[in-house]
């Protein structure tokens, strides 16, 4: 079943069960355990994780994979990754479901010097619950949005009620955008002003964004938001979308299908 997707270096990658694939049909690697959810790209490398079995302590792994290599390289082992991964040039960011001293789930950074916990973070029903911005990294935990300054300052919380927030993503401003549950669907709001949603859609299952666009996927449709315009329907209908990504020219998404209709990878121009 297709899940997880990333546009990276001119190609599009996704998982078919535990096998990393390209949209040209090439099978790259098969992981020894279940993928935790999500694929990230730093421009040249892919990052993903496997779930911990929980049999005898954490045994999950966070991997870096350079397309063309025979196998991925573990960058963090004996860990408990959750659903959510992202990357920039200095390393990979992922959700750790458990930390020492019962600290609870946290957003974790892994780089050349090892791994370190940043701020509290939880998995949500919408991919994904954290976002990397230029000045700080943000994550949802409880009724708060936590920020971790990139200049080494102390973590902080935004003055935003995140009780109903389910996803964060970067846009064209200094603060993340949140997807929040409303009475009839989801609202898309800036995290310093929840009073007036930018738009309202059916329940969102996954998001992606770059410097000019954001993509919101529901179970059966894909919406586009050009930051200089409004949120519009990009494409529909589909059977059970699970993840979405984009590059400079296209949005891409995976569906798990249903019954006699197999899952697939789709694209539409932006």
Image (cartoon, rainbow, N blue to C red):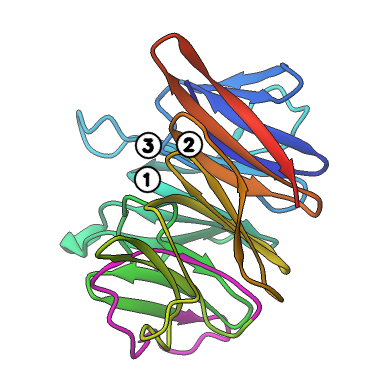
Residue 29 horizontal side relative to residue 139, left or right: right
Residue marked by disc 2: 241
**Residue in the picture at 35% in, 77% down:** 145
Foreground label between 3 and 1? 1
Instruction: Give coordinates of residue 180: x percent, y percent.
Output: 35, 67
- The dominant secondary structure in magenta is loop
Q: Is residue 196 magenta?
A: no
Tell me the crowding category of disc 1: few under 14, some 14 to 19, or many 20 or more residues within 10 angstroms, Cα based: many
Residue marked by disc 3: 60
Query: Is 168 above or below relative to 161?
Result: above
Foreground label between 1 and 2? 2
The residue tagged with tag 2: helix, strand or loop?
strand
Is there CB contact under 8 Å for labels 3 and 1?
yes
Residue marked by disc 1: 81
Distance Cα–Cα, label 2 vs label 3: 26 Å
Ranked by sequence position, the earlier of labels 3 and 1 is 3
Q: Nearer the viewer, residue 211 or 180?
A: 180
Ranked by sequence position, the earlier of labels 2 and 3 is 3
């Amino acid at each position: 079943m297709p899940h997880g997707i990333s546009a990276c270096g001119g190609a599009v990658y996704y998982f078919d069960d535990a096998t990393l694939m390209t949209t040209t049909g090439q099978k790259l690697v098969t992981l020894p355990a279940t993928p935790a959810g999500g694929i990230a790209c730093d421009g040249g490398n892919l990052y993903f994780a496997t779930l911990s079995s929980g049999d005898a302590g954490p045994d999950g792994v966070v991997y870096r994979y350079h397309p063309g290599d025979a196998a991925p390289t573990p960058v963090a082992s004996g860990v408990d990754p959750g659903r959510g991964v992202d990357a920039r040039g200095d390393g990979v960011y992922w959700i750790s479901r458990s930390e020492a001293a019962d600290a609870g789930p946290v957003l974790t950074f892994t780089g050349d010097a090892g791994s370190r916990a940043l701020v509290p973070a939880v998995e949500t029903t919408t991919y994904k619950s954290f976002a990397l911005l230029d000045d700080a990294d943000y994550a949802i935990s409880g009724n708060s949005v936590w920020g971790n300054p990139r200049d080494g300052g102390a973590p902080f919380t935004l003055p935003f009620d995140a009780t109903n927030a389910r996803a964060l993503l970067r846009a064209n401003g200094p603060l993340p955008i949140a997807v929040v549950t409303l009475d009839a669907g989801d609202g898309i709001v800036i995290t310093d002003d929840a009073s007036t949603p930018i738009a309202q859609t059916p329940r969102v299952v996954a998001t992606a964004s770059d410097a000019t666009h954001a993509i919101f996927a529901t179970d059966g449709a894909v919406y586009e938001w050009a930051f200089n315009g409004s949120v519009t329907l990009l494409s529909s209908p589909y059977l059970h979308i699970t993840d979405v990504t984009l590059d400079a020219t296209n949005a891409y998404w995976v569906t798990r299908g249903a019954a006699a209709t197999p899952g697939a990878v789709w694209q539409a121009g932006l």
